Image (cartoon, rainbow, N blue to C red):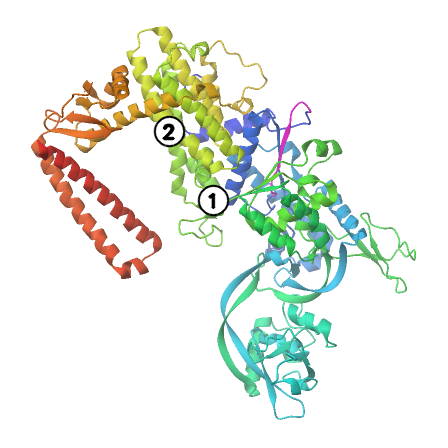
């Protein structure tokens, strides 16, 4: 392996190389090994129509961190990847693709259409998985699964048959959410509600054999063509006399009854409600209590059908709406129109308003199935992170409704139900394999149900269904951690827990980590439709995968949304460069100084005791953060240790010591120790930034020639994760070194604020009120001299402040820097006075803005926040400059 690092870190030269190395050496693969404890994650299977998003970046980076960390901790880590067939999404894509080629899905038929779907899957289905490789994910690609693999497909059908036989699955006429775009039923969770500015139309319905009428209000005028009653509250004195009478339904001229039902709120609107049982869930419930007709007036594409007057047949619902209103106006039966804000349900996939639609569908009874799933979370067998999602889970589970599991699609798991076509039999056969004949009458004229299962009715088996053998299931299951978005807590998480209890009599996972939502800097959720979501592959090309991984974790506190913009990846890139440059420093010194790990704990001074203490404290805090799912905290812990403690301070101490030290064995101990700490840094950081840590690890491993790598393929992936050693945690050393750092920083600050040229060394006089502080300065003057550009140090309790000196206080001890000879005092006084004038003007301008109520109330929140930040910064700067000028004018 090479012993040098290039001058500049170039991620593109490193990342593909190491991913191929890991994959070709099977470092992601796990087999059953009873000598090791398993740690298993199943990937939330992305849709085969999908491409990489920022949400995928966060989700998969988190999973990768857990897998790499646990692997380094000695676990048999197994991360199972896969994709979801995504019924509606894929069928929509393929249908559109065929339409462009002039091919009609319905004309070519089911079998031919499914061939195109499989072709689509083979061509595009793996794109997102290839993209994930660019991120560096340690998935066990040998275990790649698909929700329509033959064995998985069979498992889904077996689950259906099992639940049907237990009485949990039934077929019934129910009001469903209908998506006219995909022409399929969708679940309640797939409906997105949006508040819109609509209208409320008031229509007069003439009472039969009377000159009077009742007034009803509606937001969907076209549905009146399917009205079969008008309902009033039985306690409403205004209408008691009308109950039992009939009205003539305008346009249609159908006689419909006036009925009494407690559902009607007599205080709302006119107190009269039009009843359309086939197109409103509440109206359907009313129809179950009264002997009224149920008339469906819509086709599956939301055009009006043959149950309406001829002039409306075939019209789109919104065109029909306009025409109905015009007709009422012509008939003089439109009383008024009001503006009305209302929540309209939109299909998440089809992006059109859904229609409540009466349809024969397959349903799953959920109340009994949900009970074990509720108990496992109540008992703490499954924990949610952050915990607040537990409440949301319970709310949904305690109020769970029957699940509509059938979809009017072709791509997916076809429902394993056959209907005997013999008129005298009509037997329903439910089994996994196609029956040869009807078991009741022997007829071979059988027809399979046309519908497929809801996509979630296959992916709810994912946690256990991905395992191909009983042995694998017994070893790797239940899985350990599920990382997913909170938006699918009902669609997927809750249902997986239900399925696991029913089919494995176990929990599917022990912990669920709910990721943050990625938003742009304006707080909007990132989406392709808004055009505010960057292409992650472009970001990786620009900054590198490690930089993106680190940045998104660094910005994502547990349970809080992430405000992301591409330029924030500078955080990760600068961090990678900092680590890289530290490695170059160590390697350059290793060319002249022997590295011997046996000496790493020899010749320790205060800075060494401090760094070893900080290292072990960091290992302890970092590991605890990982164990408690505070990954964002972990990233900050390791960032601060590497950037500040190691690179900004310890590397400088090492430089000083190597320059001052004459004894070669001490030099060897100092450098070996610095490399030892650095190697631990690489191991700690590897789960978050795998590429750069592997590159540097491979480069520095052979610096100590006494070490031999004899544990298989050399890789940082299988190195032991650092374990904190309490014996090295030294609070006294940390406190002393912090004092030394504060002293050095105070001298540097004075030099900077008073414009002392870097080329000039200064003297430092310290009035030490504290004997321990005096001893510390006397023990380590060379660190102060080198790191703060100091010529002479005077320290003691009797030191007096020199003329024309600047002063700072460090833990009660006064630090003076004589400025004569370093700067032109008169010129500096004048510069400071001008700086005061400049800052006063800037502060005055900001104060005026913030005192203006119009500005504060009308300006965007981020603009006001920015002005307040300026106010704070200008005030603090002004105070510092005034203080510095006062010091120069005192003498």
Q: Which of 523 and 764 is in front in this view?
A: 764
Instruction: Residue 2: give its label.
Output: none
Name the residue rendered at 19%, 42% in the picture.
878
Crowdedness near tag 2: few (<14), some (14–19) or many (≥20) residues, C-alpha within 10 Å? some
294 left or right, relative to 45: right
- Quadrant in which residue 191 is drawn: bottom right
Q: Where is residue 104 in the image (x, y as percent from the top left)?
A: 66, 59
Name the residue rendered at 32%, 13% in the picture.
658
Please name the residue that numbered disc 1 is placed on.
Answer: 535
**CB within 8 Å, label 1 to label 2:** no
- Quadrant in which residue 642 is drawn: top left
Name the residue rendered at 17%, 28% in the picture.
756
N-term-proximal mark, 1 vs 2? 1
**Count of marks overlaid on the render:** 2
Q: Nearer the viewer, residue 1 or 816?
A: 816
Q: Nearer the viewer, residue 19 or 59?
A: 59
Q: Which-is-in-front pick, marks 1 and 2?
A: 2
Q: Where is residue 431 in the image (x, y as percent from the top left)?
A: 82, 50
Please name the residue that numbered disc 2 is placed on.
Answer: 643
Question: Which span is picked out in magenta?
Answer: 34-45
Specify whether residue 36 is painted magenta: yes
Can residue 671 be seen here? The reply is yes
């Amino acid at each position: 392996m090479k012993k040098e690092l290039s001058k500049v870190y170039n991620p593109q030269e490193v990342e593909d190389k190491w991913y191929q190395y890991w994959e070709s050496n099977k470092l992601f693969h796990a087999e059953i090994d009873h000598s090791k404890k398993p740690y298993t994650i199943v990937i939330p299977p992305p849709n085969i129509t999908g491409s990489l998003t920022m949400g995928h970046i966060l989700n998969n980076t988190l999973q990768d961190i857990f897998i790499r960390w646990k692997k380094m901790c000695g676990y048999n880590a197994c991360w199972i990847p896969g994709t979801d067939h995504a019924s509606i999404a894929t069928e929509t894509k393929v249908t559109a693709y065929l339409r462009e080629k002039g091919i009609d899905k319905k004309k070519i038929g089911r079998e031919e259409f499914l061939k195109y779907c499989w072709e689509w899957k083979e061509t595009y289905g793996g794109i997102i998985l290839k993209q994930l490789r660019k991120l560096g994910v340690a998935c066990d690609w040998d275990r790649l699964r698909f929700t329509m693999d033959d064995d998985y497909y069979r498992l889904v059908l077996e689950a259906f048959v099992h639940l049907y036989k237990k009485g949990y699955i039934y077929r019934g006429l129910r009001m469903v959410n209908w998506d006219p775009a995909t022409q399929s039923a969708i679940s309640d969770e797939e409906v997105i509600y949006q508040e819109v500015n609509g209208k409320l139309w008031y229509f007069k319905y003439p009472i039969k054999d009377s000159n009077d009428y009742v007034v009803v209000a509606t937001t969907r005028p076209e549905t009146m063509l399917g009205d079969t009653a008008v309902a009033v509250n039985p306690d409403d004195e205004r209408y008691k006399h009308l109950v039992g009478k009939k009205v003539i339904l305008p346009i249609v001229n159908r006689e419909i009854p006036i009925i009494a039902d407690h559902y009607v709120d007599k205080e709302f609107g006119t107190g009269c409600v039009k009843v359309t049982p086939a197109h409103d869930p509440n109206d359907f419930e009313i129809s179950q209590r009264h002997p009224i007709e149920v008339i469906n007036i819509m086709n599956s594409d939301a055009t009006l059908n043959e149950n309406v007057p001829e002039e409306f047949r075939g019209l789109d619902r919104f065109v029909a709406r306009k025409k109905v209103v015009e007709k009422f106006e012509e008939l003089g039966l439109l009383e008024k129109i009001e503006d009305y804000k209302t929540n309209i349900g939109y299909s998440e996939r089809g992006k059109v308003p859904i229609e409540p639609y009466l349809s024969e569908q397959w349903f799953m009874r959920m109340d009994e199935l949900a009970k074990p799933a509720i108990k496992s979370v109540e008992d703490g067998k499954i924990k949610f992170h952050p915990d607040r999602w537990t409440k949301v889970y319970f709310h949904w589970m305690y109020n769970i409704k029957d699940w509509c599991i059938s979809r009017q699609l072709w791509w997916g798991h076809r429902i394993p139900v056959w209907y005997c076509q013999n008129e005298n039999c009509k037997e329903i056969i439910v089994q996994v394999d196609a029956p040869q004949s009807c078991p009741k009458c022997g007829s071979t004229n059988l027809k399979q149900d046309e519908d497929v299962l809801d996509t979630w009715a296959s992916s709810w088996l994912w946690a256990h269904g991905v395992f191909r053998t009983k042995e694998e299931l017994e070893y790797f299951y239940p899985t350990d951690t599920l990382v997913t978005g909170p938006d699918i807590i009902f669609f997927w998480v809750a249902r997986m827990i239900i399925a696991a209890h029913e089919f494995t009599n176990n929990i599917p996972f022990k912990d669920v980590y709910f990721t943050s939502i990625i938003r742009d800097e304006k707080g909007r959720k990132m989406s392709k439709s808004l055009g505010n979501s960057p292409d992650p592959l472009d970001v990786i090309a620009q900054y590198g995968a490690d930089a993106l991984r680190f940045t998104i974790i660094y910005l994502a506190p547990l349970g809080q949304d992430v405000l992301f913009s591409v330029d924030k990846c500078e955080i990760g890139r600068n961090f990678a460069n900092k680590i890289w440059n530290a490695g170059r420093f160590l390697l350059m010194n290793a060319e002249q100084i022997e590295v011997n790990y046996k000496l790493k704990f020899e010749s320790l001074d205060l800075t060494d005791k401090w760094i070893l203490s900080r290292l072990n404290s960091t290992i302890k805090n970092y590991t605890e953060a990982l164990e408690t799912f505070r990954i964002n905290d972990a990233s900050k812990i390791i960032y601060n240790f590497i950037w500040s403690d190691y690179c900004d301070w310890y590397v400088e101490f090492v430089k000083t010591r190597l320059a001052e030290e004459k004894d070669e064995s001490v030099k060897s101990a100092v450098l070996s120790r610095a490399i030892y700490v650095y190697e631990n840094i690489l191991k700690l950081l590897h789960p978050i930034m795998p590429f750069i840590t592997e590159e540097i690890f491979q480069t520095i491993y052979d610096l100590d020639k006494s070490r031999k790598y004899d544990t298989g393929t050399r890789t940082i992936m299988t190195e032991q994760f650092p374990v904190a050693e309490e014996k090295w945690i030294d609070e006294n050393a940390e406190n002393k070194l912090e004092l030394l750092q504060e002293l050095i920083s105070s001298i540097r600050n004075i030099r900077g604020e008073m414009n002392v040229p870097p080329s000039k060394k200064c003297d430092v006089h310290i009035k030490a009120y504290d004997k321990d502080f005096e001893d510390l300065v006397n023990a380590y003057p060379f660190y102060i001299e080198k790191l703060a550009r100091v010529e002479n140090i005077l320290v003691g309790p009797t030191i007096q402040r020199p003329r024309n000196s600047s002063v700072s206080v460090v833990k009660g001890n006064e630090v003076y820097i004589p400025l004569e000879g370093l700067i032109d005092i008169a010129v500096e006084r004048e510069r400071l006075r001008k700086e005061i004038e400049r800052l006063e003007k800037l502060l005055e301008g900001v104060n005026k803005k913030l005192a203006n109520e119009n500005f504060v109330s009308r300006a965007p929140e981020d603009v006001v926040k920015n002005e307040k930040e300026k106010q704070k910064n200008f005030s603090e700067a002004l105070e510092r400059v005034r203080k510095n000028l006062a010091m120069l004018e005192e003498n």
